[in-house]
Image (cartoon, rainbow, N blue to C red):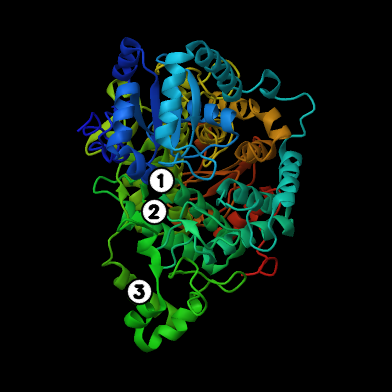
Amino acid sequence: MNRLAEETSPYLRQHADNPVDWFPWGDEAFAKARDQDRPIFLSVGYSACHWCHVMAHESFEDAAVAAALNTGFVPVKVDREERPDVDAVYMEAVQALTGRGGWPMSVFMTPDGRPFFGGTYFPPHDVHGLPGFGRLLEAVGEAWTERRAEVERQADALADAVTRRSTLPEVAVGLPAASPGGAARLAGAIDSLAQRFDEVYGGFGPAPKFPQPVLVELCLRHHRASGDPRSLAMAETTLAAMASGGIYDHLGGGFCRYSTDDTWTVPHFEKMLYDQAGLVRCYLHAWQLTGRHHWLEVVEETIGYVLRDLGTDTGGFCSSEDADSEGEEGSFYLWTRQQFDDVLGEESKVASSWYGLDGDPNFGDRHILRRPPGTAIGRPPAVTRARARLVEARAIRERPGLDDKVLTEWNAMFGSTLAEAAGATGRREWVDAARSLAGFLLGQLRGPGGRWLRSWQGGRARHLAYAADYAWLVDCFTRVGELTGEAQWLGHAAEVAEDMVRLFRQGDGPLFVTGADAEALVVRPLDALDGATPSATSVGGTAMVRLGALLGDRAVGDAGRSLLASVAAVADEHPLAAANAVAGDDMVAGGMLEVVVTGSRPDLVRAVQARYEPALVLAWGERQQTPLWEGRSDDLAYVCRDYRCSAPAATVEELVDRLEDEGRRPPVRLDEVAPA
């Protein structure tokens, strides 16, 4: 057994019995590399990564490969979800070397951490132009011992490349002189999206197709602001294609990570918590905008999946479920027609037709359940009955592996979404779950002195939290405060926001990935561009603008606006790489819509929470000593924008009138714009 058995990461513990003498990332590994003059072999992956498991079985469980690693290198294993800083730095190196990235990530580096060679998956033997891993180890070892000067030059050049790729050029930081800003920048981003939009199957760009909820949100926001049917059509076509495709779990709810094909049929079957958080928000807003009930069904089923299958007894949520079960990718989700017939009997015909089992299998000799593109999503009663029986039958199968570490960022992200969904729908159990999750984060993810930590598992929290953790905590606590009317959550949000700026920002620039108190890597990367999740800079900036409006604290709001401005030039040049910042800037440019509901008026609170108003903040419940509450009489709703307030509303009808008067445009519910 190597040194990984006591790690909090299930991914690292999966490698504890490898014959490879793995080290976790840390001083011990680097000291050994220096003392023995060996290169470090860095392997980065995550628990739900299918090809990570493949490489582990093929190479890391092989005695000959292990012997080569143990004698010639210092092997280091990293969970990218626990250490996104390490992953970000060395992924830049791999992309600079190969032009592409992914996981598993394999990097060779000097004892001082400079990478000199790397790639992703390497097979055990030469195949399709890829060198076998054993032969690669021989070649790298020979270069290290025989051509050290060449290796050092390569390490210097690659370290310089990583530095350039991990930071924004000076011209890209700050507000450009001729920035269009606001609605013009948002419209420009939509034009760019339209050029990449797949009009047949939805999504933006060719296969492999990732959900990209930030881009869908951009379309919904633009439609809400402009009434443009094009942006709503792009959003709804994409949402319909994903919800009907194999990327969606039609029996248990929730979305797989991505689709390998254009039609969203064949996914990699892992399910990530952050995807559920981002996509639930998209479907929730689509329902609020259009009133289409099938969008709400996706919200309910996906939240149901997270609460049921990713929940813990503590109130937090696990990171992901694997693609594999019973040693096979997707086995838990696949069906044959005979299995359908065995479970459903005479009802099999209708359900088989509905889920696409009448045709040829679409995954080997079995079927991934899906609806044909462009067909209805809402299930008829007969299919609903059959679905319940299929769910029961599937429950006896071996479930995919569960990564039970609880990540601050992903949990806070889901907490934000859950709070918004609870308010919009009035679902009491979701209110309780959002409050419980926020309480868990407060109680379990802070270290001595209040420093937030990244990861929790089995009662232990580890690793200093990153900018993204802080940014989503600000958003989560703010939205839980808006959901519950409890003042404490805004206080927690303000504390996190202050620490976020202090630890992760220098001057007027974007947020760094790591805090000023964190371990120094080869480079300190910025978190300014969107990836699988929105950038920390845009999330933190937007959250602080909203928090500042709720607190009546101009300094907090100005700090948020400054963060968004720090990536304005990038948003102009590459709007789809900074789409969440484009959305935040549009909110700022239009002015915040501030609503205060005083006294005990749950009807007025519900009227506000039910609407999709991206630039709205809601104060209610416990009175606070802030300008937003000064001079307010009880049992009324006050609607303000840009330091100007409408007459107080005493009824729901009056409140809706005020909101539509103060909004840039009235809400649109156009059922005829996009196909269901």
- Report the mark closest to the observer, 3 or 2: 2
User: Is the C-beta separation of discs 2 and 1 under 8 Å?
Assistant: yes
* Residue 601 image offset from top left, x and y in percent: 45, 54
Name the residue furthest right.
Answer: 178
Residue marked by disc 1: 49
Give the amino acid type for the residue marked by disc 3 in the picture: Leu
Left of 589 or right of it: where is 33? left
Give the amino acid type for the residue marked by disc 2 in the picture: Ala
- Of residues 12 and 153, the one drawn nearer to the viewer in this rendering: 153
Q: Is residue 587 above or below residue 239?
A: above
Give the amino acid type for the residue marked by disc 1 in the picture: Cys
Circle 1 residues within 10 Å: few <14, some 14–19, many ≥20: many
Is residue 521 at all visible to an observer of this figure? no
Q: Quadrant of residue 391?
A: bottom left
* Residue 311 image offset from top left, x and y in percent: 30, 51
Picture mark count? 3
* Callout 3 secondary element: helix
Residue 390: give its label: 3
Please report the residue visible at 57 percent of the width from the left and 72 percent of the height from the top: 372
Q: Earlier in the sequence, mark 3 or mark 1?
A: 1
* Residue 351 image offset from top left, x and y in percent: 44, 80
Left of 302 or right of it: where is 180? right
Question: Looking at the figure, which quarter contains the N terminus?
Answer: top left
Disc 3/disc 1 C-alpha distance (Å) = 27 Å
Residue marked by disc 2: 323
